[in-house]
Image (cartoon, grey):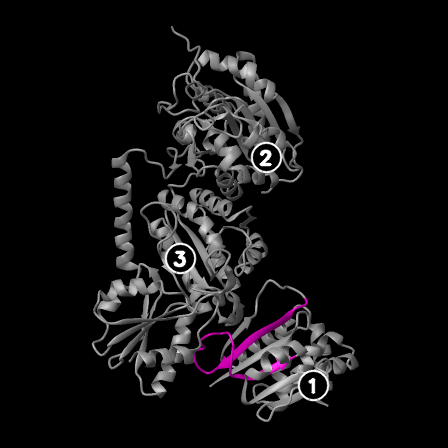
Amino acid sequence: MATKIIFSGFGGQGVLTLGQLVADIALNQGKEVTWMPSYGAEMRGGTANCSVIISDSVIGSPIVLNNIDILLAMNIPSVTKFFDKIKPNGNAFINSSIVTPNYMPTSESVNITAIDASAIAQKANNARGANMVMLTGFLKQTNLFTIDEIEAALQRRFKAKPELVRPNMDAIKLGLE
Amino acid sequence: MKILMKGNEAICDAAIKAGCRAFFGYPITPQNEIPEYMAAKLADSGGVFVQAESEVAAINMVYGAAAAGVRVMTSSSSPGIALKQEGVSYLVGADLPCVIVSVSRSGPGLGGILPAQSDYFQATRGGGNGDYYLPVYAPFSIQEAMNLVVKAFDVADEYRTPVMVLLDGMLGQMMEPCMLPEIKASNYDNSWAANGNSGKRPRNTITSLNLKGEGLEAMNIRRFKTYDTIKEKEIMVDNRVQDGDEVAIVAYGTPARIALNAIEMLKEQGIKAGLVRPVTLWPFPYDTFQNLTSSVKRVVVCELSMGQMIDDVKIGLAGKLPVSFYGRTGGMIFEPEEVAAYVKSCI
Amino acid sequence: MSKVVYEKSRGLTDNPLSYCPGCAHGIIHKIVADTLTSLDVLERTIAIAPVGCSVMAYEFYNCDGIQAGHGRAPAVATGVKRTNPDKIVFTYQGDGDLAAIGAAEIVHAAHRGENITVIFVNNAIYGMTGGQMAPTTLIDMKTSTSPKGRAEAGTGKPLLVSEMLAQIPSVAYIERVSIHDVPNINKTKKAVKKAFQNQIDGKGFSMVEILSTCPIGWNKTPSASLKFIETNMVPYFPLGVFADSPAKEVAE
């Protein structure tokens, strides 16, 4: 079984990094995994997204187009672009600090988790850590990985700057409260 | 230990480990990570990186470095590979080894930057002048891309020919787990190189010029004898068709993975299909198609193009079996469901 | 006992030159070959031949040689020099090769300040292909593609390559010389020597533009051709040093 995940947001919100972090966790679980960015002429300011597929067997196309299992959306355009492509009983983790109630989608078949990620990150004194707070969606709604696995992945990622692990973990923990 | 790496960057690490000493390139999406990574990494390992003024200049810098006897690489994407064809023909004509990584996008013309396989003809038939071929490797995973880059350097040196590694844009851009391959010590003779004779040997000259018809014909015949050896020894094919399979799906690169997913779906629907994945696009594994197991009644070729490799499949089959084609182009990628539905519609 | 008073340059092979009678390529080859010999660098030199009349130059210089695509010699030289910084690398290019099809390659080799030597032979015509107009063909000069003489309208004025390249910030040395008489041949020898010495000293991109003849393409006798340089070429292509500011930083 493959789990198809889209991480989407504004360029600069850290969605590509977040996708890589999750892919790295999957790699360390011994899974097959692919990470694929959208790439294009717009380098800044536009909507950035990446596809991550985690599977027990060989992964075909690394690009997720339909039948999304999990959408992690950090802004309104991401919801507009991908929400309708989530498969029945799929999950949407939506940054409700930016996707205000007027824009928050409703659905009978998709399990929506609103996460006040930007606000929580501010509260944790880590304004750039909103992407990390979004990981709480996975922890609450899926069995893909644990908080300890996130910490281990952050330690691998910030091998050269270990002081960055703590503030990110603090933001995640505040998000779980 | 496996690490998560982007295809374009993994290729660079493999090349450097294989002894690549020089890289000459020019920016073009979707292969920019290659020159960027080389600019940082190659210099650190004592090599040479130059960002050229054009793809034409870059391939001619490759020609110079190859003529001087060092392991050298360039990379580009579709319109940029088109510009390099002049230099590729010269490299062949002067019997110079090098590795060319082609990360193809969609065309023709400026086309688009999304992944495609519409440069199969460009890779296997070339656009440079003269009688020539290049060995062309088409990996379907990042690990295989790393392994084949290492192999490409060895094959280039062994047969004194440029070698191409052809990726679709997906493989270049995506990340997946991989590890650096082990490198066998390779010690190829480059006593032919024009790098200054130091008074120790007669002077060496590197040229593709031969104004005498007999001389040039002899050179071409000699080169085609080398091609015969390459055909004998270097063909690589991943043939997963088993006895009992009704359909052989032929695909290379990332689409071969999509085909594998489609084959699983077909199996659930009671249709037995198997994959034939050419790994060398030149020399093409023609014999595989003559020797397909007798249960196979139909061949379906899947490409991200309007149909290019299908010509080689038809040559291989020589009319033995019906051939159908399913393709998407312009950067559109087929999904396994589409491929499965098409295969089902053929039988 | 006889005494050697003149001998063929050790910098040239025994291959007979392929040039037309009266062509000045032979003079220039000898100057370059003598320079490489006197600087004692022949055994670590790689000559890059162009496309054009001197396409076979790699057969004439008694050192390693590489034949390059049309106009691409500076790019090829870059590939050789960067991977072999301790070797001496020079290109030998004509005006069609360097100033037309290879304009981008020469500009950017100069722009990068490549530590190479460029011998640019300007005889204002495409010789090998049959006397067609070059970027450096003089106004009113008849060629096979300017049968009524080059007109400014539509073909522009002759390209002043040395002046143009001298504008590039990273060049070390650019001089235009001529071979139309003995004093000028002696100046050419000095310029060529300096262009190679610069490379040995790591000073960067050095080019000598040499005004030369094409008696066949110009439809003139060899001596009238030499006179034509003096009376027609030099007034338009002034001789002299256009850049002489060794680069501070050169790629290793």
Residue extent of the magenta highlight: A45-73
Q: Amino acid at mark 2?
A: Phe
Q: Which mark is residue B162?
A: none
- Percent across and percent down for residue B199 are 42, 32
Q: Nearer the viewer, mark 1 or mark 2?
A: 1
User: Alpha-carbon distance for marks 1 and 2?
Assistant: 61 Å
Q: Which residue is mark 2?
A: C205
Q: Count neighbours of disc 2 (C-alpha within 10 A) and say few if under 14, some if 14 to 19, many if 20 or more.
A: many
Q: Amino acid at mark 3?
A: Ala
Compared with A55, B209 (above or below) is above
User: Alpha-carbon distance for marks 3 and 2?
Assistant: 35 Å
Is residue B259 shown in magenta?
A: no
Q: Are marks 3 and 1 in contact (CB under 8 Å)?
A: no
The local secondary structure at tag 3 comes to: helix
User: Alpha-carbon distance for marks 3 and 1?
Assistant: 49 Å
Given the image, what chain letter belongs to the residue carrying mark 1? Answer: A
Compared with B295, B155 (above or below) is above
Compared with A152, B111 (above or below) is above
Compared with C192, A114 (above or below) is below
Q: Which residue is mark 1?
A: A115
Q: Amino acid at mark 1?
A: Ile
Relative to residue B324, is residue C44 drawn left or right?
right
Given the image, what chain letter belongs to the residue carrying mark 3? Answer: B
